Image: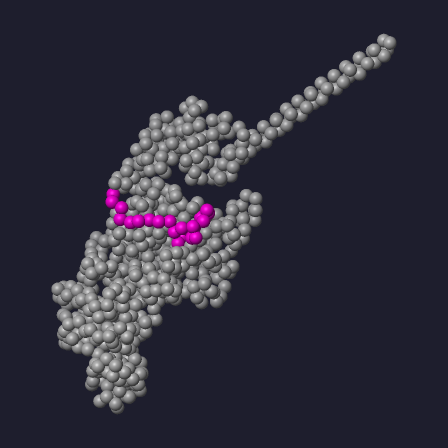
Amino acid sequence: MRTKAFSLMNVTDLNKILRKISIVLSMTLIFMSLSSLSKLHGQNIVQAKKWMKEGFYDKALDVFSKNGKTEKNPDLIMLRAICYYHTNQIDKCLADLRLQESFYTGDPLLWKYNGLCLIKKEKYEDASKNLKKYLSLSKSSQDDYQNIILEIRRCGKALQLSRKNQDAFVENAGPIVNSSENEWRPVYSPNFQDRLYYSSNKKGSTGGKRNQKGLVDDEEGQYYADMYYSDFKEGNWSEPTTFLPLLNTPKHDLIGDFNGEGNILYYGLTTDFVFFEYYSDTFSTEYHYDKSAVKVALPLTGEYGDKDLFIFNDSLLFFTSRHLPGYGGYDIFYSKFKDGKWLSPVNLGPEVNTSFDEVSPFITKGGSTLYFASDRIDGFGGFDIFRTAYQNNNKKWADAINMGKPVNSPWDENHFLLAADGMSGVFSSNKEGGYGGIDIYITYFKEQKIEQLLFVDQPSFLDSIQVKPIVEGDSSGSKIQKKLLRLPSLYYVNNDDLLSNQNIALLSKLSENLLIYPDTRLTIYAHSNAETNRDMELYLSLKRAETILSFLIQKGVDPYRMVVKACGSSFPISPPFINGISSNVAEKNNKRIDFSLISIAADIKVNEERNNLSGVYLDDRYVLFRKAEDTLVFRLLIAQTQQMFRSELLNHYQEIYIEKTQNEPTNHYLLGQFAFYDEALHTKTTIEQQYNVKAVLIPYYKGKPLARELYGYMSKTMPELQKFMLREE
């Protein structure tokens, strides 16, 4: 019995012991597991701190967000808040700062990052107070001490800038152009007015996801940037079109700029946005290529970090560099092409460049106004867009002016360009309210930037333009200084806009040139949209042209040197309807005054500036009319009146305009631009029979009636003129 009892007791104890052993083993395993996890978390925190030092805040943030201990550890909360700040998640950073403050640690970093976040929120007074508190708790020997002083000064500057009147409206280019990633370096097409090129690292870019070394990394890598373009059609952006694989590579492919003719693209390749390789490619059209891209020899050295290429023309370019001798950080340089090579880069000087970074230069067509981005303290925070004008009187750049709100913000604004008409611009920014990362924005100015409507071959800050604007050799080997005359179009919305401040400035310059060169002859073309009855439309167009004529006469220009051609809607540069829908492009471009010079002197060069419309946006009627103004055509004089001419004929024929000169003060209504005499004669017979008008057939050459004494000489090479002479003379 005892044996049995003893035996049963031993089994029971053994079971108890085994249960105890099992519990002990389980506790041991749990402890070992927790110890291992704790060690793993510790290793991750060390790695996260290392990533923060290297600037990989997004990777470090992922560690802190997944770490269960973060919410209970004020030090980890602060580290996560810093990561939120550097990844531009300001609201989350502020939330973590409030959480960290609840632990009452008295960490001075609370004041620092509260201040920096409040700058992003444009609460500059509160930001300044927080940053000053941080300085009071810090030592002047700290690495960030001087930088915080600069941020405090920036707060004061930003408050002053915020009080200035806004002269522009800004809107995001929208979700078709922009993505949750980055879109930057926008460049207007030189050939298509409404086409925009840019770079983006959106999902699906060439090469897949890659790490910082450029190696494929589907787990932690990011897409590298490709080059795209999008067209603005009928008020909307088209789906972005990517470049062919020849240009888009597994590296970051960054748009640089086009040459003057728009048939050569310059672009850069990089893996780290620090060092670059530059290539060029010749376009056969804007989106097909006829040969392989080649590495290009330019005065900027990508291997040393030179960037932000901007081409003024084929003999002058700008870029930014921090390795060339300068004033600190990135400076803006220019280089001239002479005798078959690019000359050594020249620093733009201390009026433009500072100890801060000056990047992304853009100079207007007039060559006197420079736009650029800088992180100097005269801004709202980060990089702002500035502009400066070159002063010919003292040969210096004026003090740079911050473009203010809403263009600039406490975030980074960069890569600003003016549109060809000076009414709008484009830039990139990571400001709040976008679609993620860096977005492309459009700015619309309340007043036209007329510096973009001017034109010079060389900017005035170059010594050569001050002495010899354009030098050409004549037959005797002597050198002639050739003056460039610009003939920009004047745009209007209503009659009051004809003599707007911008248009007056352009007309004043035109009158000065006409007085300097008295042997020139000016033609004034008045265009409009179809806005009323056809007879009234042409007559109103004439009155607008006469308004411009009167202004020039008041400036002293001889009225006998000028011809008026009132076209109304006869020759629109853009069709009023596209696919049955009213066109905004037509509304914007058809209401304008154009000019051309005839009997041009030998020592001047004329540039007639027109909008570069193409495709469905360009009306063939305008193209044919401009060609007719440069060759021999026949026109029918259908009426000579001192008042408005009314006839059903005006509604049945589109190609009609009014011509008026001081030699013939009556209004001449002219129809057609016939290249063939027989066609003109047939139309003459038809309208005389149907509308009871007496029409006179007149040959025009180079935009004016051909002088009778030239008939015989010109007919030797013009068979149609021979027919006219045989039948009409």
Colour scheme shown: one colour
On the image, the x and y values in percent for residue 655 come to 28, 74
In-front residue for pair 475/653: 653
In-front residue for pair 701/51: 701
Residue range highlighted in magenta: 164-186
Q: Quadrant of the C terminus?
A: bottom left
Q: Is residue 146 above or below residue 554?
A: above
| Residue at 82% from the left image edge and 14% from the top image edge | 8
| Residue at 83% from the left image edge and 13% from the top image edge | 7
Question: Is residue 171 in the magenta section?
Answer: yes
| Residue at 28% from the left image edge and 36% from the top image edge | 156
All told, the count of numbered labels is 0
Q: Is residue 146 above or below residue 389?
A: above
Question: Is residue 591 in the magenta section?
Answer: no
On the image, the x and y values in percent for residue 221 come to 53, 45
Residue 96 visible in the current orientation: yes
On the image, the x and y values in percent for residue 513 come to 19, 65
Residue 548 vs residue 194: left or right?
left
Q: What type of secondary structure mainly makes up the magenta span?
A: loop
Asked which quadrant contains residue 449, the reply is: bottom left
